[in-house]
Image (tube, rainbow, N blue to C red):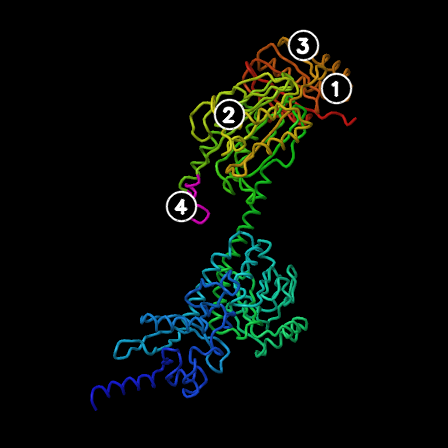
Amino acid sequence: MDDTREAALWQALSFAQSVLPMAVYDADLRLLHANERMCRIAGRTEAEMRGHRSGFLLDDGAADDGPDDGGAHDGGADDDAAGPDGGRPARGGGPQTPAGALEAALRRVVRTGEAESLQTVRRVDGERHLRSWALSLSPLRNASGRVHALAVTGFENSAQRRARAGLALLSEASMRIGTTLDVTRTAQELASTPLPGFADFISVDLLDSVLRGDEPTPGPVSGDIPLRRVAHESARHPDAPEAAVAVGDLDHYPESSPPARCLATGHAVLTGPGDQAYTDWMARDPRRGALAAGFGVRSLVAAPLVARGNILGAALFTRHLHPEPFTEEDLALAEQLAARAAICIDNARRYTRERATAVTLQRSLLPRGLPPQSAVEVATRYRPADSQYGVGGDWFDVIPLAGSRVALVVGDVVGHGIHASATMGRLRTAVRTLADIDLPPDELLTHLDDVVVRLASENFGSAGPDGDPGAAADEDIGASCLYAVYDPVARACCAARAGHPPPVLATPDGAAHLLDLPAGPPLGLGDLPFESAEFEIPEGSTLALYTDGLIESPEHGAGTGKGLGTEPGSGVEGLCAILGTPSPSLESTCDTVLDKLLSPSRTDDVALLLARTRVLDAEQVVTWELPAEPELVADARERITGQLAAWGLEELTFTTELVVSELFTNAILHGRGPVLLRLIRDRTLLCEVSDHSTSAPHMRRARVYDEGGRGLLLVAQLTRRWGTRQIPGGKAIWAEQPLPAA
């Protein structure tokens, strides 16, 4: 046998015995030869196809432009090909090449003489699902070099195409599922993402504990499982007529049902009408069974939603429009989808729980109600920077003090979230404790600065919540504070600030300006002095205390000057303009301030405290200055008796005489004169004795035969509360009694 005949025989054998489908067409695209594999795919013999547009050019078996019946995982390489509507690609349809597109490619090969390759999908004769083929189109030339025929060879790559489509679906799911930290929204994203290519109906059911943000349930779980429907989506209709359970309803899944089985095993379950367990489940739930039969459910996959070893719920994927049931490959893909979604749902659950904890903490730390007092009328507002998270480090407080005075406090801890809220709570408690001692504003800030320094030193090197030794050290403590004390008797305000904006004072005549309050360093620097200043405040004036988040925003700067300014466009100028404008109430003024000054793009929390000053009438305050002489104790009692009679408080005479006798005697024995005796009738009756000694008295337990030491104990027993405070040049001891009910 010569070489030419041997080569021809070898080519003929290769063509006939090739496991790949092969066909040869003439220049007019009529079939000349087809091997056995090509004939089996087409379902026709070579003789039946010869001279016709057959093989891969068969119109009746070629891929159409409809959706791929093989599911989302049957997508091809060109996953961006537009769908039939010219819009979003048909998920899973892939680059289906009709016979017309193949014909055009073959004609180009005839015309150009250059080989081409393309992707197509078509059914094998006798099968219902589509297969994916990579076609190689090669020109065949005659002796003169002219293309007189074409060879078409097909290579099936359905598995690779399904794998690529599965990865594409997982990639799409990673982008579309978990876009928010909302459990319900995340469940809706899981139900909608795989439609319609992978499934025709998807439902997501969760445990009630997940929706509440409670501690998760460790898996696996067995027995009947109560799950609440959170989301479902249908490829048939937006109203999801296939749903047997309405969104929000609780359904009990029996132990043999697919959702309960997947939660018991921790793996996805593939079932359908041919499964006895599925049939039993449908029989136990007639409504569900009727719907499944009516819509022609072919296959169902139940996938567990498990994250970090905890059971969250189950997702059900159903096919009734797809002609093909789910496969083992689909089972693995559904399990991966559910696993990714479960992490997102668990993140949302943990966020919901942490947010609830933080909000509860914040609400417990901020004043729930303002205490009753007569010095000022107060209105407050608090707005966290992250309205969704709802917590921050800003705070305000109103603290009644002795002598009808009131302390007004606004502070700002750097940061947001639970750490800032916890630090804010500790500082607020420290301020209230120091205020009870009745320290002057500058001394109070000095002690508060020591507290912040101590908190920072405790954080340094301590382990964080996850056991990381450096985690707590990274959470630096920075804070600012403004502390002001208003006296309605003296009509004066004494204030000091630590790294905080100064207050704004708006007087009744409509003028508003920043108080010239000396600037102090932020809290936590240590060993730096604070300075207080005192101002006369006309009756009916409004004091505005605020945090810097109110006046600093991208739209308007805080200003310049002495720490802040009032030039046009600054936040302070806007605040002064609002406070200087008449308003029906402080509450409406607060609303106007927030509406005008708050920026939607702000990144800092805002606390605002408005206080309108009042004064006590002259008839409510009586003061006597007496020499420090023992014989004047009786005179002091007489003065007290007469004044109580004038006020109609005769019921308090006996107790008040005893209190005055003890306090006046202590001032004579342990202090220096003259002695100042003052009565204030406000919400309580306050008796105050001042002298020129700075030594503070303290209560002690007297022995049986001691002649003294029982005075302050007697005062404490007879009055609601008592205390001492430092005043310029001495001290004052005071005691309060409740007024008679009448």
Mark 2 and mark 3: Cα distance apart in space: 43 Å
Residue in the foreground of this view, choosing between 93 and 590: 93
Dots 2, 4 in contact, CB < 8 A: no
Give the mark, 1 or 4, whose residue is nearer the N terminus: 4
Q: Position of residue 114 (x, y in %)?
A: 31, 70
Secondary structure beneath disc 2? strand
User: Which residue is identified by label 4?
Assistant: 469
Mark 3 and mark 1: Cα distance apart in space: 18 Å
Dots 3, 1 in contact, CB < 8 A: no
- Residue at the extreme left of the image, as rendered: 2
Residue in the foreground of this view, choosing between 494 and 657: 494
Report the span colored magenta. Answer: 462-475
Give the mark, 3 or 4, whose residue is nearer the N terminus: 4
User: Which residue is identified by label 1?
Assistant: 653
**Residue 497: assigned label:** 2
Q: Quadrant of residue 166?
A: bottom left
Give the mark, 2 or 3, whose residue is nearer the N terminus: 2
On the rendered image, what quadrant is the C terminus found in?
top right
Residue at the spot 20% in from the left edge and 89% down from the top edge: 2
Q: Nearer the viewer, mark 1 or mark 4?
A: 4
